Image: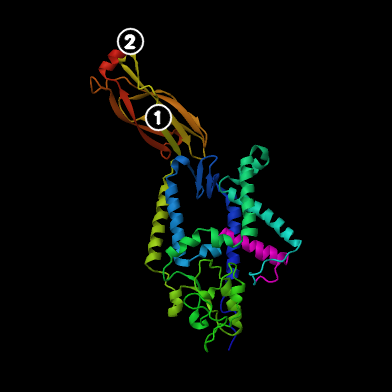
Amino acid sequence: MSTCSSCQTPYSKKRYLTFGLLTIISLVLPFIRVGGNHFFLLNFEKKQLHLLFTSFDMQELYLMPFLLIFMFLGIFFLTTLGGRIWCGWICPQTIFRIVYRDLIETKLLGLRKRIKNKQLDSKKSPKKIIAILIWVILALLAASNFTWYFLPPEDFFTYLQDPTEHTVLLGFVIAIALFLIYDVIILKEDFCIYVCPYARVQSVMYDEETIQTVYNENRGGKIYDNHKNLINTKPTGEFDECTGCQACVSICPTHIDIRKGMQLECINCLECADACTTVMGKLGKTSLITWASSTAVEEKRKTKFLRFRTVAYGVALALALVALFMMGSTKEHMLLNINRTTQLYKIKNEGKDIQNAYTFLFQNTDSKDHKYYFEIEHKDISIKKPTKPFMLKAGKKLKKIIILKADKNLSMHNEEDTLLEITIRAYAVDNEKEIVVKRETTFIYPSPNSIKKQLAK
């Protein structure tokens, strides 16, 4: 019988490649800017959201619901399709533990005898202090990296030059780093088992075709009964292929026996599948542990990826993504808020000139400076102040007192004031076609009796 040790590419190599790519992307992405904007940045200091290299002011956060919907649908879709693929292949907690346990403790310092045995703690040695110090440095880097998605690196490093003036930032980074040190060195995989809420809700999203880490009991033989009680350490059936070597148990980072069936603690890291691949390959056989749906393994067929639930999630994801891009493409390059002052109106020129005052808050959300002005879409109401366009720098706000006037009798009632709906059309003088917004407000025209009373005073 020919050797089959290479029948399956070890999942660990694919995971390490994935971890490396994700780490590089997470570290490099905050430094990439297009037109001064980041790929993703939720800047609380400047009250901005950067998404796909486009900046949005907090007043434009109508995008957030679509972004959150897309994120949650993505998690549901991934879980339904690939089980806890997030936990084993993407989660920072898993990556950090791999770096500390497998790279620093095992490969670099030799505190663990073998990378394939994760059941034993690392041995006590002065080298342990070195391992902790290395992780402290990496934890500070990871904490800083996390902060860069809420405070851009260019501001982050500027603030660090004067830490006494930015103690909140410094405390935030140190707090995250301390948590990562405690999590990775002390809490370990107990975080996945006891703390992480994702493990508790994932089973609701599973169906019969969800990909999981599955031990093929039909080939390997029974190790546990239907009540999860151990029968034998090695199957006793004549055609049972499991050798009872327990390589899959020794390598499991969450200390479970996958032969017992699907368990809450399993994070789909597939370390057990790699271990079984090595052992069974020496016997010229394929691994007894595979990444497939339990139904597909039982029925000896391929997993059905296209099914109602995955198609439904896929369609919902596509719709959320389209909505996100459509809303993002309608970004306004200027914002305008209009508020009336406490005084309803002023009566001038013996009642022939009625004035209303407003507070206009302009904001230039473009990356360039612009001159702004506005017009009134009402034939009988005109602008008294300001009379000229005004400059507003990129990203800045400007509050202006605006006075509108009506020099024609617009009253519709003798006793009551008349409320006139008007439209304000504001625009950039240098780019009127693209940078323009419209806002609705009211102009109050006093009744003839109100004018007489006011003039009598």
- Please tell me which residue is depicted at 69% across the width and 64% down the height of the picture: 105
Residue 90 seen anywhere in this rendered image of the structure: no
Q: Main secondary structure of the magenta part?
A: helix
Q: Which residue is mark 1?
A: 339
Q: Secondary structure at mark 1?
A: strand
Residue 128: which quarter of the image? bottom right
In the image, what residue type sits under mark 2? Lys
Q: Which residue is mark 2?
A: 457
Q: Is 342 displayed left or right of 187 in the figure? A: left
Q: Secondary structure at mark 2?
A: loop
State the residue in front, 6 or 189.
Answer: 189
User: In the rendered structure, does residue 109 fall within the stretch colored magenta?
Assistant: yes
Cα distance in 3D space between marks 1 and 2: 28 Å
Going from the N terminus, do you reach mark 1 or mark 2 first? Answer: 1
Q: Quadrant of the C terminus?
A: top left
Pinpoint residue 398: horizontal percent, then vertical percent. 48, 30
255 shown above or below 346: below
Per the rendered image, the range of residues in magenta is 90-115
- Please tell me which residue is depicted at 51% across the width and 81% down the height of the picture: 222
Pinpoint residue 129: horizontal percent, then vertical percent. 73, 58
State the residue in front, 256 or 93.
Answer: 256
- Please tell me which residue is depicted at 69% across the width and 63% down the height of the picture: 104
Q: How is the image coloured?
A: rainbow
